[in-house]
Amino acid sequence: MANNIAKKVSWSGEGTPLLNGAEESRYSGQPSGGSMFHIGRMSTVDLEEEAITTEEQDPVRHRPSEIPHNEKLLSLKYEGLDYDNSENQLFLEEERRMSHMGFRCLEISRWFICGLIGFLTGLIACFIDIVVETLAGVKYKVVKEDIEKFTENGGLSISLLLWAVLNSAFVMFGSIIVAFIEPIAAGSGIPQIKCYLNGVKIPRVVRLKTLVVKVCGVICSVAGGLAVGKEGPMIHSGAVVAAGVSQGRSTSLKKDFKIFEYFRRDTEKRDFVSAGAAAGVSAAFGAPVGGVLFSLEEGASFWNQMLTWRIFFASMISTFTLNFFMSVYNGNVGQLSNPGLINFGRFASESVQYNFYEIPLFILMGAIGGLLGALFNVLNYWLTIFRIRYVHRRYLQVMEAMLVAAVSASVSFTMIYFSTDCQPLKKESSEESSEEYRLQLFCADGEYNAMATTFFNTPERSVKSLFHSPPGTYNLLTLGLFTLVYFFLACWTYGLTVSAGVFIPSLLIGAAWGRLFGILLTLISSNKNSIWADPGKYALMGAAAQLGGIVRMTLSLTVILVEATGNVTYGLPIMLVLMTAKIVGDYFIEGLYDIHIRLQSVPFLHWEAPATSHWLTAREVMSSPVTCFKRVEKVGTIVDVLSATSTNHNGFPVIMHSGRDDEPGKLCGLILRSQLIVLLKHKVFVERARSRLYQRRLQLKDFRDAYPRFPPIQSIHVSQDERECMMDLTEFMNPTPYTVPEETSLPRVFKLFRALGLRHLVVVDDENRVMGLVTRKDLARYHLGKHGLEELDLAHP
Amino acid sequence: MANNIAKKVSWSGEGTPLLNGAEESRYSGQPSGGSMFHIGRMSTVDLEEEAITTEEQDPVRHRPSEIPHNEKLLSLKYEGLDYDNSENQLFLEEERRMSHMGFRCLEISRWFICGLIGFLTGLIACFIDIVVETLAGVKYKVVKEDIEKFTENGGLSISLLLWAVLNSAFVMFGSIIVAFIEPIAAGSGIPQIKCYLNGVKIPRVVRLKTLVVKVCGVICSVAGGLAVGKEGPMIHSGAVVAAGVSQGRSTSLKKDFKIFEYFRRDTEKRDFVSAGAAAGVSAAFGAPVGGVLFSLEEGASFWNQMLTWRIFFASMISTFTLNFFMSVYNGNVGQLSNPGLINFGRFASESVQYNFYEIPLFILMGAIGGLLGALFNVLNYWLTIFRIRYVHRRYLQVMEAMLVAAVSASVSFTMIYFSTDCQPLKKESSEESSEEYRLQLFCADGEYNAMATTFFNTPERSVKSLFHSPPGTYNLLTLGLFTLVYFFLACWTYGLTVSAGVFIPSLLIGAAWGRLFGILLTLISSNKNSIWADPGKYALMGAAAQLGGIVRMTLSLTVILVEATGNVTYGLPIMLVLMTAKIVGDYFIEGLYDIHIRLQSVPFLHWEAPATSHWLTAREVMSSPVTCFKRVEKVGTIVDVLSATSTNHNGFPVIMHSGRDDEPGKLCGLILRSQLIVLLKHKVFVERARSRLYQRRLQLKDFRDAYPRFPPIQSIHVSQDERECMMDLTEFMNPTPYTVPEETSLPRVFKLFRALGLRHLVVVDDENRVMGLVTRKDLARYHLGKHGLEELDLAHP
């Protein structure tokens, strides 16, 4: 199915004859409609339909529960976002009317909105934190009392049951709301936000409903004791807040505040969503700079200084808000020194020394992290494919989530039960340990079970404990077993139909084996008081390595970890570790988020065109022939083109009337489907052979009011008389679309497309006639595989 | 002279008739040639000539020593850099020949080069640090002994003389090498690097000679006791190292290592220079992340993930190298916890708390910093204009530098002499104070003069002392006087013909008034043991505010300060302070670097087009008519066009032979002056009416060998016979230049230009005929002044 481009190009020197064939195969996709379905959780509704279609079309295969999945496909169901303004006459008139002061006011409102985004994101983080802590507190208290009761009398299986049932109940609720109300709220949401910032419109991803489900879902899954964190979903939440606030209205609540109307377009909205994502990171880790870098590393393409400062501002406000309200909640108002949802605790200055000869050890840890991360990703990849094929019905998804919750509880319980690692309770660290839930179990009085410290806690607390507990708190076996068990639990958990993040579990796994590594070093070295004596340092490096190996971020992650630990001394080793983890991991498989994006067949544009793609030119890449409109076009034609289900183009070049129909016309503009729909809705028609008869002059406001949920063409009724009218597109089309000649090489087209955030790029010949149209899908199709350049197929949903 | 565009556009609805007039006035500039001269230090050689020209042309004005300066001009002498590859046939062929493995090797060499850049930059930083410390140590020791000798006997004026002469001698040497050998090495070099990264070719800025002069110069000026820092020049040094290393040869040393030939073009070189600048920041402040952000905030436009990681890698290696070698030098090998040339010292964890109600105070400090920064900039602006007009002869520049050195010494001495602020010597902080040079002077035994701690030290040590000395170390009067005196000294010093930075003096001024502010707060508050008791915190905030107010960086500066202080707790307040300082400062005047860039009349492109520029379209902005070449052009024509001194165009559209001469031809490519020169040099001619007779087929290598110092056209001899030959440009021109239609609005043109880092943008009509050419100067001309959009004039040098 997948054409090997490297091979193809070698014998396609002449180019054109091959083109049509390629086009055909490109659009034909797989024969069965079901092939287009990818991630179960992303559109379950479609999935049910798809399953039925598959069944009908393919009566031979009697397994309706299996959905085939082809990775070598690119879905056509995702629309692009316009990061490039459509500078039509209406737009230019508005901009020209605006005074210098007007622009200044706009700038101030942008800052104001960013502040508001930060504030609300901080509040949400605060809410999640408080509710999770309260629920988890109640749960652990109940279970602990129960265990203590039964430890003496025997009958601990009842405690296990209680624990498992409690967890499953939480998870069931969280899973049900996600599966049945808003499937897009599943997972951490980071892949979706990455796609959005990249310029792909993921349906329903920034809606209010998604936010509500996400917040409730994450509370349930963390309280339900799954191996998940509450940090990843904060990024998604911040993005939703940003998308909502910046538009000054909520379509879900049918409430329009009539403010910020200027910002109702993709360009502005996307800027704000970057700010929201940054604010989310910032609130989650108390890392404002890390938030900015996350937004830039994962999302943005064009680095604009003012935009960056606004993003930074939103991040600041977000941390600050969280910080302030948490200080109020914790009773020490105004103490702002403990930011973030997760706080890894400060590493004391005297213990943070590291030495030159430790650098190779850190690099080794980075390599281990890269390997383990790649293993995690491979396992999760297989699991995800399995889920796409077999676990796509909603009730199955809920059941799987409950199963994982019950297994998590049982495994934890078993581990604690059979563990003999008893540690003396230290009185001096009472203020810290009072917050933790320690189990005595079979240990002597005055001792506690060390295994329970890691399992019988929220993951955040376990991480902190691994970083900061004094040497000797854990023994080797505990850490080894914990790493092993938690690794598989976390891997199984990520991708469930619950809303949850992978950051904290990764950190926890890494911290566990990192501490193990540190203890082993101490054992090997003869001098017990050496610099290696502190296993907390190695726990931190291990955490960084593991997380880096899984998600493959470097710059932003370094800053996030530095900000979260409150100490810059470890900056350099953390960087080294992350860089090594990334290089090692990339050798085997992509990062976790990229895997999920690929499995969803999203037309994601990477930073640069594949290295060996200079062979290709715009002529081979473009879609052709293109559906064009004339400058003054018959309404009937427009309606017919828009209604055609076989082509769901979103942009149409507008051409000069060339006189002859067989020859392509000269380009004079570009108009979008959404614009045409607004025009049709407002019936901006000119009756044939008469002067213009606008019902009223259309304003930019009319387009903004319809944004972003433009009605489908089917909902617009056009009478037979109206079909005969003409529509003058001059005022509404973008008269200066970007164009490239046919000979332009793919990297050049890619660079233009990516740097400007385009959605459509018109390919013209040397007479400025429209020869083709390049869209995001045409570029995303080419990627560097194992055997050189590969071409993905496009398929209609 | 300056046309007010806002006014002009209102009556230029018809456009074209006005155009020619505008063009004329645009290119005529000021009548006298001298008007084009800007920053004395940047091209003193030209200056001498210019001065003479002015004298001759304008006999009425009998003041040859005064050079008029017009700010409303944009110099035409600066060429642009091509961040966009010229994708001609040769280039594409090479790229297509390269295998996947070839690209991977290139990527590995990029990483290797970045590592090397970091390593060498770190070494240079190390060298500067050690030499400065040694020289300053010797100097202070000599002076101190002398002072101690004369304190008892009287006759301190001899000590003053000794001090002043020592300082002047150092500064004289530093100033002479800068003024007479390489004037571009003056100042911090940050404005020049900003311009380079922006895409403006500043002559001689990245040469080896510049680096040598810069390093020696900065050592002399710091050792000479000027109010300067050694940190700014590190950025320039890093950039030069990068430009040198990445090319695999040195034109100055006439040594070509025949490696890295692929990187011999503007695109690649600029990427490496970003890395070099980041490595410089990283070495200077021990701030690798800050370095990356500096490069991005000040330089880059297109954010590329891989590039960013390489920059990050270079920064890491740079800090690490400096760190390691300094630890060896200081005798504790392998202790890597004290990075950077300047180390502000770690703020102890218990003293770093800040409280909610301190936030308004921090914001107030930010505002003060903004005001003081604006004052600094205004004074320096006037001073710079004065220097351009009157202090442009080299000997005058050297004398001014020596004068400043002598005055600095005298003022310091006077301040110390009249100060009565005696503080007891603390024994407990002996390890720290042993490094400082303390003067007893007229104080009682066991006491030292506090004023001398600030003046009689390298600025770096004074900053550290202000941050960390315990409460009560300085009294109010000392700090107040010090702030006042140092403010004016620093302002006078920046812009001298010495190589020196403004970071440290700014921090020092800010730290002084910040500490003053903190002490005042303690006095006001009744509770002496309150959280305000630590003035060091306020010193830090003051330093941030002052530096932010002067240079107007926010994100990168926050990170730099956080990394340099080794503590992230102050991140939030530092951000607030910097943001406030920027907003307040921007109300009055631009940042210091931007002022100097503007005074140099560099065509600098900001991030976005001016807000109110939607009135303008490519038609009004472009240069027209354009000199074009035919696809096969007569050699004589090419030589004549290139030799014409009135137009020194660097890019020429190549057009299709249209048959008629009066009508503009269809665009089919773009060729650069540098390419044509290489073609002429290699005599790639075709004799008329014969088949092609290449002497040998020209390779991409021939272009790379000539890069970047292409010979002038005058050095190429073309015989009369050869003039009659033809030259076929097809293979060498870029066949797919970016184009825009005439109606494209200025912001759109600007965005395309800036995002892709273009040098030439061809404006075409709807038949793809060349109508004009937009270059950097055409866009940089428009800027937002006090009275709306203003247009700068262009003038030939």
Image (cartoon, coloured by chain):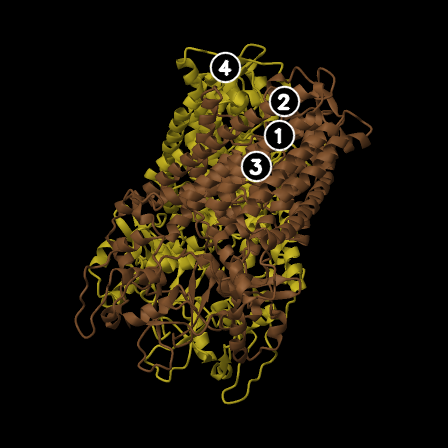
Chain colours: A brown, B yellow
Q: Earlier in the sequence, mark 2 or mark 1?
A: 2
Residue placed under numbered mark 2 in the picture:
A146
Residue placed under numbered mark 1 in the picture:
A163
Amino acid on which disc 1 is placed: Trp
Q: Name the secondary structure under disc 1.
A: helix
Q: Which of the two discs, 3 and 4, sits closer to the camera? A: 3
For the residues labelled 4 and 1, the Cα–Cα distance comes to 59 Å
**Chain name for mark 2:** A
**Chain name for mark 1:** A
Image quadrant occupied by the C terminus of chain B:
bottom left
Q: Is residue A730 left or right of residue B548?
A: left
Position in image of residue A676 (x %, y %): 32, 63
Comparing A773 with B504, the one in front is A773
Q: Residues within 10 Å of mark 3 (few under 14, many from 20)?
A: many
Residue placed under numbered mark 4 in the picture:
B472
Please name the residue shown 42% across and 79% down the image. B656
- Check the image and name the residue furthest to the bottom: B689
The answer to the question of whether label 4 and label 1 lie on touching residues, with beta carbons closer than 8 A, is no
Q: Residues within 10 Å of mark 4 (few under 14, many from 20)?
A: few
Q: Earlier in the sequence, mark 3 or mark 2?
A: 2
The answer to the question of whether label 2 and label 1 lie on touching residues, with beta carbons closer than 8 A, is yes
Q: Which of the two discs, 1 and 3, sits closer to the camera? A: 1
Image quadrant occupied by the N terminus of chain B:
bottom left
Comparing B183 with B603, the one in front is B603
Amino acid on which disc 3 is placed: Gly
Q: Name the secondary structure under disc 3.
A: loop
The label number, if any, that marks residue A229 in the structure image: 3
Q: Are marks 3 and 2 on the same chain?
A: yes
